[in-house]
Amino acid sequence: MNIVAVANQKGGVGKTTTTVSLGGLLAQAGERVLLLDLDPHGSLTSYFGFNPEGEGAGVYTLFQRRAQGEALNPGGVASLTGVDGLSLICASTAMATLDRQLGAREGMGLVVAESLAQLRAQYSWVLMDCPPMLGVLMVNALAACQHLLVPVQTEFLALKGLERMLRTVSMVQRSRTRALDVTLIPTLFDRRTRASIDTLRQLREDHTGMVWPGVIPVDTQFREASRAGQPLTTMRPSARGSKAYAQLLEWLLAETPLGGAIPLREVSRG
Ligand code: ADP
Ligand code: MG
């Protein structure tokens, strides 16, 4: 099972879009994919038509059960997204109270890792959409994942936010037994703007070897896809944005330890 976290403490940089797009591509390639919505805002949950204001099932339930010493049944809280091979564990706004309620309790940093360990036989990939703040949910994601993807918007203010995220990562690295692989993904790239071009150059200069060599371009079709509740990569594989995510996935499989265990049958080239 490949476990990937998608995180950045800045909002609106493409975390949810990246989670949905890669999840869609992997599912289409025949993988059994589980998406985890760890953001109390529940954008990923809403994307697939579920209500994050609801009962507080999903991720919230996993934490409550652990706190009450009950058995975890992570498979039981997964929902189907309507896309073949793609399941989702929903977020709820109640998750915003987890830090206050349980943050300090012992063992709360490993709830996600322990839950996922029970799902090894059911899923070949897990993608986690992380919250934009450092707290018990982010700590759980960074403890559970093998690989971290950090979408970075190619605009001036983005690089400051990135430094904050990378400080969080190096803090977590110290408590891990296995090093966390990190890939920075330039997103919302608009080649007509100075800001995009300059930020991209700066990013590659500052973080040599950590940045995916491609870019995710601005593509208005992402918004249409989110209205339709489907990954753009599934709905319109030939869209510019879909092709960019297909290239990203190919690169991740070829150039990082990801996918080493399970060869993909086919990654859509768009
Ligand atoms: P985050 O999860 O980091 O807050 P989102 O993935 O939700 O960011 O993206 C924020 C907004 O930008 C959404 O409305 C999304 O549809 C849009 N968006 C994301 N990536 C792109 C892109 N490459 N081109 C155009 N719009 C995008
Ligand atoms: Mg989001």
Image (tube, rainbow, N blue to C red):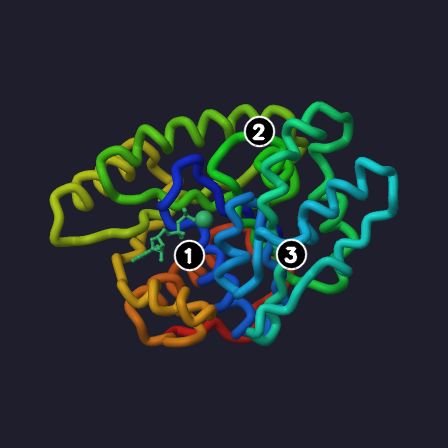
The percent position of residue 178, horizontal first and vertical second, equals: 64, 36
The percent position of residue 174, horizontal first and vertical second, equals: 60, 24
Q: Answer yes or no: disc 1 within 8 Å of ligand 1.
A: yes
Residue occupied by mark 3: 89
Task: Give the residue type at disc 3.
Answer: Ile
Q: Residues within 10 Å of mark 1 (few under 14, many from 20)?
A: many
Q: Answer yes or no: disc 3 within 8 Å of ligand 2.
A: no
Task: Give the residue type at disc 2.
Answer: Gln
Distance from Cα at disc 3 to Cα at disc 2: 26 Å
Q: Is residue 211 above or below residue 250?
A: above
| Element carrying mark 1 | helix
| Of the image marks 2 and 1, the number of the one nearer the N terminus | 1
| Element carrying mark 3 | strand
Distance from Cα at disc 2 to Cα at disc 1: 26 Å
Q: Residues within 10 Å of mark 3 (few under 14, many from 20)?
A: many
Residue depicted at 76% across the width and 50% down the height: 117
Residue depicted at 30% across the width and 36% down the height: 158
Left or right, 30 with respect to 251, comes to: right
The answer to whether residue 149 shows anywhere in this view is yes
Q: Residues within 10 Å of mark 2 (few under 14, many from 20)?
A: some
Residue occupied by mark 2: 173
The percent position of residue 221, horizontal first and vertical second, equals: 30, 67
Task: Give the residue type at disc 1.
Answer: Thr
